[in-house]
């Protein structure tokens, strides 16, 4: 599946506020083209905006609990769930492919754990710290219809890039 930057669902689209359905094991094969397309889309976004490490399926209008991360290689995360989130928070300016020129000041948990299924439907558990923790909190929020704009610290916490 060849996805282009124009396929990214933008702020204001009602699909971004919906909760996604879980991925079923038998759907994996049919979702492989989407996984490849999302991995490539991250690289296209990064080439244009100088940022972009992961994307959630609803950001291209597919309402499934799928996140693709592409930092050094593409990784598909099916049905990711966060748990054991730290009480220690970090404040940051967050960005999003669905509003590429807007930054949002918010707080995220400094660390947490994530359980998900991989491409082989094996359960994985990762310990997330700092940048990776905030990144995957952001992406999993997308699966629950929550945008960074909804987590802004106050009405002064939005800024144009």
Image: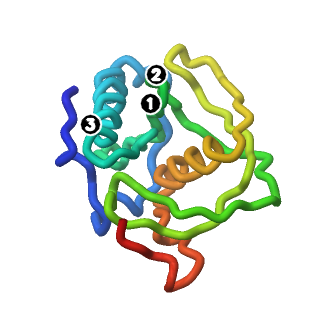
Neighbourhood count class around disc 1 (C-alpha, 10 Å): few under 14, some 14–19, many 20 upward: some
Left or right of residue 89: residue 61:
left
Residue 7 in picture, x, y percent from top left:
20, 45
Q: Where is mark 2, residue-wise?
A: 73
Distance between mark 1 and mark 2 Cα atoms: 5 Å
Left or right of residue 26: residue 87:
right
Q: Are marks 3 and 1 in contact (CB under 8 Å)?
A: no
- Front residue of 85/50: it is 50
Distance between mark 2 and mark 3 Cα atoms: 14 Å
Instruction: Indicate which disc residue 44 carries.
Output: 3
Distance between mark 3 and mark 1 Cα atoms: 11 Å
Q: Residue at x 48, y 30 (%)?
A: 71
Q: Where is mark 1, residue-wise?
A: 70
Q: Mark 3: which secondary structure?
A: helix
Left or right of residue 107: residue 85:
right
Residue 38 in picture, x, y percent from top left:
33, 33
Q: Residue at x 40, y 24 (%)?
A: 27
Q: Residue at x 31, y 48 (%)?
A: 49
Q: Are marks 1 and 2 in contact (CB under 8 Å)?
A: yes
């Amino acid at each position: 599946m060849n996805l282009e930057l124009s396929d990214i669902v933008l702020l204001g689209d009602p699909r971004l506020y919906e909760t996604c359905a879980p991925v079923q094991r038998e759907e994996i094969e049919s979702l492989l083209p989407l996984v490849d397309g999302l991995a490539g889309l991250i690289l296209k976004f990064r080439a244009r905006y100088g940022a972009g490490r992961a994307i959630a399926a609803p950001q291209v209008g597919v309402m499934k609990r799928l996140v693709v991360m592409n930092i050094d290689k593409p990784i598909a995360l099916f049905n990711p769930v966060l748990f054991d989130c730290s009480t220690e928070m970090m404040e940051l300016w967050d960005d999003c492919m669905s509003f590429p020129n807007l930054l949002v000041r918010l707080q995220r948990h400094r660390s947490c754990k994530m359980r998900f299924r991989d491409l082989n439907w094996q359960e994985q558990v990762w310990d997330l710290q700092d940048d990776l923790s905030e990144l995957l909190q952001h992406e999993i929020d997308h699966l629950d219809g929550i945008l960074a704009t909804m987590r802004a610290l106050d009405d002064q916490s939005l800024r144009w890039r």
